[in-house]
Image: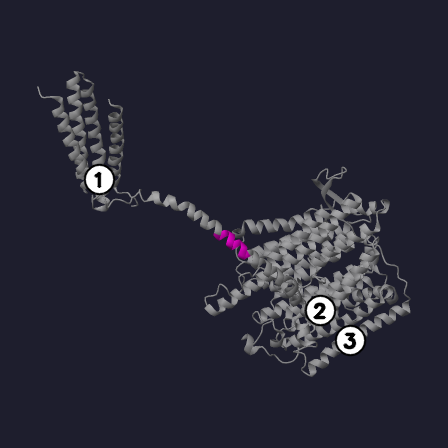
Amino acid sequence: MLPLLFLLPLLPLMGFALLMLFPRLFPEKSGGWVATAFIGTAFVIAVVRYLGQTDTPAQETLWTWLPNMALNANLSVGFYLDQLSALMALIITGIGFLIHLYSISYMSHDPKFTRFFAFLNFFVAMMLILVLADSYPLMFVGWEGVGMASYLLIGFWFSGRGSESSDKDLRAVGEKEGVNNSNAARKAFIMNRIGDLGFMLGMFLLYKLYGTLSIPELATRVEGVSVATAGVELACLFLLVGAIGKSGQLPLTTWLPDAMAGPTPVSALIHAATMVTAGVYLITRSHFLYELAPNASLWVAWVGGLTALYGALAALNQHDIKKILAFSTVSQLGYMFLAVGVGAYSAGVFHLLSHAFFKALLFLAAGAVIHALHDEQDVRRMGGMRKFMPFTHIVSAIGVLAISGIPIWSGFFSKDAILAAAFETQPALYAIGLIVALLTAFYMGRWYFLVWRGEYRGAEATGVVHPHEADTITKIPLGILAAGATLIGFLNIPTFLGGGHAFDTYLGRAIPQEAHEISASTEWTLTVLAVVVGVAGLAWAYAAHRASKLDNGPLGQFSASALYLDNVYDGLVAAPSKAIAGALDTVDRGTDGLIGSIASNAAAPGALFTMWQSGFVRAYAVSMLLGTAGIIGYWALKMVGSGA
Amino acid sequence: MVPTSYYIALSGILFALGMIGVLTRRTAIMVFLSVELMLNASNIALVAFARSWGDLTGQTAVFIVMTLAAAEVAIGLAIIVAIFRKRETTNVDDLAAMKG
C-alpha cells in the first residue's frame, strides 16, 4: 500500500502550522530541525510514490470542492500523480530538504529563526499542491500560495538587518534597507498578480470552451470536442501570461532580480526548486492544449528566447553576487520556455531538473561566501576566496561548469537537448540560444573569477581579514548538490552518444515526445558547437580576468541597469500611477476636510450647552430658582389675566 | 387666635432666607444648613394650613419631610466628610469637577 498523495503537501503544511502557532515550543534551533524533518519525510514519501508508480497515473480524490458548477460538472479536490508530477515532487522535496538543512546553519543568528522555517515549509507545501493538483483551480490555490509565500520570504528582512541595533547609524542604514526589502516583496507580489489574472482568464475561457477544469478530463475532452482554434489559442496565451508572471519572463521579469532581497536560502528555493519553475510546469502540464495552439506555442518559444537573451545581457555587468545568479535564472528559465514552446517538453523539464541542482548549488555557495564576509554582496570586494574556502570553491566551480554547458556536467546535456530541438523547428531561436550560451559561460566565468580567483580585495571594505570556511551543516547540502549537478545529466544520454534517452522515455509516458529528425552527424556538429561556445565564453572571462577588466563587464551601465527595463516601467506605469494617486489623494483630502468641517460646525451649538454643565452647585440652584420663579410668575399672570 | 397669614409670612421669610443662604454660602455645611431652613419653612406652612383646614394630612406630611431631612443629612454629611478627606475643602465651587 503506497502512502497517500495528500500527505505530501500536508506534512510541510503541518510543519508550518506547528511552527507558526506554537513557536515557543521550539527553542533555539529545534524549529529548523522540525521543519527539515517534515520536508525530509515528504521527500521519503515522494521517493516511495516515485518508485511505486505505474504507467497509469494515480488520481486520488479527497472531497467535493465546488459542486454543481454548471452542467453537472463537479470540481473536487484531488491529487494527480503521473511521471511529470512525480518528478516535480521529487525536485521540490529533495532540493527543498537540502535548502532547509542549509538554512539551519545560515539563519542560526536570526531572531526570527522559527518563523523563517514556518514560511519555508509553507512555501514547499503550496508548491506541492501546485504540482500535484488534478484541476486548474486547485493548481491555482498552490499558485497563489507560492506567491504569498514568496511575498513573506522576500520581505523577510522587512525591517532591515541592522534595524534593531543599538548603533544609531547602523539602524538608519538598516531601516533604509528594510524599506527596499519590503518594496521588493511588494513588487514580486504585484507582478505575480498580473500574471495570475492571465491564469484566471485562461481558466474561465477553458471552462467556457470545454465545460471542465479537471486536467485529466480536459485532456480527453480536448480530442473529442472540436472548438474554434482561436479559442484554444487565446486560452493558451492567457495561461502563458500566468506562466510569465510566475517565472519572471519578459515583460514581467523585473521582480525576479529584486527578489534577491530575501535571505539567500529563499533565493535558492524560489529560483531553483519551486516558484519560478511553476510557469514551465504549467505549460508542460497543459501540453495537450498547446499542441492545438501552434501560434501560442510560438509565442511561448519567442518569449523564452528573448528572455534568455535579456537575462544573459543583464547578467554581464552586475556587481551583486546574487544578482548575477538571479539574472542567470531569468535567462535559464527562458531556455526552458524556449524548449516547451518548440514542443520539446521533456527537454524543458530536463533542463528544469538540472537547473534545480546547479542553481541551488550556486546560490547556496554564494550564501556561504556572503556569510563568510559578513553580509558583503559586492563581487568587487571579494576575490581570492578559494584560499579561505576551498570546499565551497570546488563546489562553486562545479556549478559554473554545469551551467556553462561543459561536457559531462548536467547543463551540457540539458542545454544541448534544448538547442537541438530549437535547431529543428526555429533556426532563429537556435541562434539566439547559442549566443545566450556564450554569454552564460562568460558571465558565470566572470562570477567565478571575481569571487574565487585573484587577490582578496575586501579586507578593508568588509572588515573581515580571514573569511572562514562554511560549517558542516552547510557543506552537506553543497556536496550533495554538487554531486547532483555533475551526475544528473547522465540520466538522459542522447542516442548519438550511445545513450538511450532514459529520462525522455520516462517522461514520455506522461507528455509527448518530439520526434528526432536530425541526423547524428548534425547533432554532433551542434554539440561540438555548443561546447566550443561554452569554452569560448569561459576563456573570454579568463582573458578579461588576466587583463583585470572584469570589475566592469561588457555593455557597462546598459547591462548593470538591466537594460533599463525598470526605468521604462517606472516611466510608463509607475509615474502615471503615482500622478493619478497623488491627484486622487488631493481630492480625497479635500473631501475629507469638507466633511470634517461640516461635522465640527454641526457640533458647535452643542458645545454652547456644555457651558451650562459647569459643576457649580449654586449656579444650578440659581437656574432652578429662576425657572421656578418664571413658572410661578406665568401662572400668576394667567390668573390675573383670567380675572379669577 | 393668630391668623394663618402670619404663619405663612414667617414661612415665606424663612424660606427666602434659606434660599439666600443656599445661593451665597460657599461652604457645603452652610449650604446644607440653609437647605434645612427651607425645609423647616415649608414645615411651618404645612402645619399652619393643617390647622386652618382642621385636617391632619398636613401634620402627617411634616413628619415625612422631617424623616426625609434626617435621612438627607445622614447621607449628605457622610458625603461631605468623604470629600473633605479627599480634597481637604468643602468649598462647593472648588468641587465643580467630579474627577478625583
Residue A18 seen anywhere in this rendered image of the structure: yes
C-alpha separation, residue under disc 2 versus residue under disc 1: 89 Å
Q: Mark 1 = which residue?
A: B80
- Give the crowd class for mark 3: few <14, some 14-19, many >=20 residues within 10 Å: many
C-alpha separation, residue under disc 3 versus residue under disc 1: 101 Å
> Taking B100 as reference, is A323 above or below it?
below
Q: Residue at x 48, y 70 (%)?
A: A169
Residue A590 is inside the magenta segment: yes
- Give the crowd class for mark 2: few <14, some 14-19, many >=20 residues within 10 Å: many
* Number of disc labels: 3
The residue range painted magenta reads: A585-593
- The amino acid pointed to by label 3 is Val
Q: Residue at x 79, y 60 (%)?
A: A299
Colouring mode (rainbow / by chain / secondary structure / one colour): one colour
In the picture, measured across the screen, residue A546 lies left or right of residue A509, that is left
Residue A478 rendering spot, x and y as whole percentages: 67, 65
Q: Mark 3 = which residue?
A: A535
Q: Quadrant of residue A283?
A: bottom right
Please identify the residue farthest to the left as the structure is shown. B1
